[in-house]
Image (cartoon, rainbow, N blue to C red):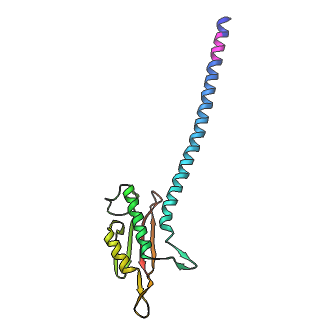
C-alpha cells in the first residue's frame, strides 16, 4: 500500500512537471510570435523610411510631375552612395533584385549619366554649375532648371528602391 501511494505521488509529480513545462512552452511560443511580428514591423518601417528618401521625388501633384532641381538629384545620388557604402556594395556593377544596391541615372539633353552614385564630387559640382539655371527670354541664366523622376524600381526580394532615374523637362 505504501509503494502504491508513493507511485501515485511520483506519477502526480511527473504530470505536474509536464504541465508546467507545457505551460512554459506555450508562453514561449506566444512571446516568440510576438517578438517575430514586432521585428517584422520594425523591418517594414525601416524599408519604408529608406524608400521615402526616393519616393518623395516620384509621382504627381495636381496632375503635374513633381519638379526637382539638380541639387535634389545630387542629394539622391549622395544618399544612394552612402547606402551602398553602408551595405558594403560599392563594388557592385549595378542594381539587381538580390542586393540592396541603389543606382541613380540622370538624362540631361541627349546625354545620360549612369551610375551617378559612383561619381566624384567634381562631377557633382560640374553638374550643378551647368544645370542649376536656364536662360530666360533675354538669354540670362535666371530661371531654375527643373527635372522630373522618370523611373523608380523596387526590388521584389528586399522591397527597397533599387533604381531611380531623372530627366530634364
Q: Which of these two is toward me, 59 or 143?
A: 143
Q: Residue furthest top?
A: 1
Q: Magenta segment range? A: 6-11
Examine the structure image and report whether residue 10 is included in the region drawn in magenta.
yes
Identify the residue at horizontal 61%, vertical 25% (top origin).
Answer: 18
- Give the residue displayed 36% in from the left and 58% down from the top: 85
Quarter of the image with the C terminus in it: bottom left
**Residue 127, image x, y percentages:** 35, 76
Residue 28 lies in the magenta stretch: no
Work out whether residue 96 can be spotted.
Answer: no
Q: Residue at x 54, y 80 (%)?
A: 64
Q: Answer above or below: position of 135 versus 132.
A: below
Residue 17 vertical position relative to residue 69 in the rendered view, above or below: above
Q: How many numbered callouts?
A: 0
- Residue toward you, 80 or 121: 121
Q: Quadrant of the N terminus?
A: top right
Q: Quadrant of residue 3?
A: top right
Amino acid at each position: 500500500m505504501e509503494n502504491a501511494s508513493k507511485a501515485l505521488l511520483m506519477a502526480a509529480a511527473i504530470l505536474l512537471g509536464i504541465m508546467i513545462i507545457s505551460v512554459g512552452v506555450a508562453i514561449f511560443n506566444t512571446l516568440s510570435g510576438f517578438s517575430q511580428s514586432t521585428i517584422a514591423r520594425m523591418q517594414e518601417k525601416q524599408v519604408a523610411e529608406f524608400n521615402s528618401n526616393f519616393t518623395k521625388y516620384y509621382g504627381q501633384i495636381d496632375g503635374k510631375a513633381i519638379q526637382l532641381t539638380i541639387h535634389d538629384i545630387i542629394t539622391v545620388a549622395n544618399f544612394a552612395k552612402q547606402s551602398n557604402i553602408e551595405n558594403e556594395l560599392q563594388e557592385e556593377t549595378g542594381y539587381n533584385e538580390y542586393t540592396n544596391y541603389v543606382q541613380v541615372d540622370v538624362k540631361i539633353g541627349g546625354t545620360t549619366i549612369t551610375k551617378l552614385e559612383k561619381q566624384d564630387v567634381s562631377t557633382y559640382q560640374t553638374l550643378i554649375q551647368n544645370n542649376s539655371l536656364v536662360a530666360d527670354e533675354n538669354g540670362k541664366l535666371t530661371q531654375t532648371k527643373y527635372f522630373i523622376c522618370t523611373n523608380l524600381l523596387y526590388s521584389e526580394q528586399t522591397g527597397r528602391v533599387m533604381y531611380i532615374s531623372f530627366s530634364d523637362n
